[in-house]
Amino acid sequence: MTTSPPFSLARHYYETRRELRTAAGERTTPWFRLADAERSVAVAETLRRAAAEQQLLPEHLMRAL
């Protein structure tokens, strides 16, 4: 079984942020223990951030030229 790219990206992004928060002393829930609603929020947040980064990319490239 394969996972969809947004779901995989969201899991990676969430776990990376969780590691950073853990290093800072904050306790967070691992991805596999998130409730469905929490996981949905994480996926939506990841998609929002990815869209924002995609909008910045052409702007950054134009400045480099």
Image (cartoon, rainbow, N blue to C red):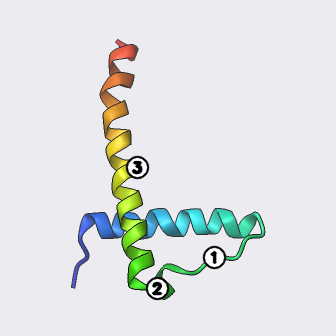
Is 45 left or right of 5, judged from the image as shown?
right
Under mark 2, the amino acid is: Phe
Dot 3 amino acid type: Arg
Q: Secondary structure at mark 3?
A: helix
Residue drawn at 32 percent across, 34 percent down: 55
> Which class describes the residues within 10 Å of circle 3: few (<14), some (14-19), or many (20+)?
few
- Quadrant housing residue 20: bottom right
Q: Is residue 17 left or right of residue 10?
A: right
Can you identify the residue that label 1 sits on?
28
Along the line of sight, which residue is nearer the eye, 51 or 8?
51
Element under label 1?
loop
Q: The disc labelled 1 sits on which kind of residue?
A: Thr
Pointer 3 or 1: first along the chain: 1
State the CA–CA distance, disc 2 to disc 1: 12 Å
What residue is disc 3 on?
49
56 above or below 17? above
Q: Quadrant of the C terminus?
A: top left
Q: Which percent across, then down, holds residue 54?
A: 31, 39
| Residue depicted at 47% across the width and 62% down the height | 13
- Front residue of 31/48: it is 48
Q: Which of the 4 image quadrants contains residue 22?
A: bottom right
Looking at the rendered image, the quarter that the N terminus falls into is bottom left
Residue drawn at the location 34% of the way across and 23% of the way down: 59
Q: Residues within 10 Å of mark 1 (few under 14, many from 20)?
A: few
Number of other residues with Cα within 10 Å of mark 2, as a class: few under 14, some 14 to 19, many 20 or more: few
Specify whether 38 is left or right of 22.
Answer: left
Q: Which residue is mark 2?
A: 32
Residue 35: which quarter of the image? bottom left
Which residue is the extreme one toward the top? 65
| Residue found at the very far right of the displayed protein | 25
Spatial separation of the CA atoms under disc 3 and disc 1? 20 Å
The alpha-carbon separation of the residues under discs 3 and 2 comes to 21 Å
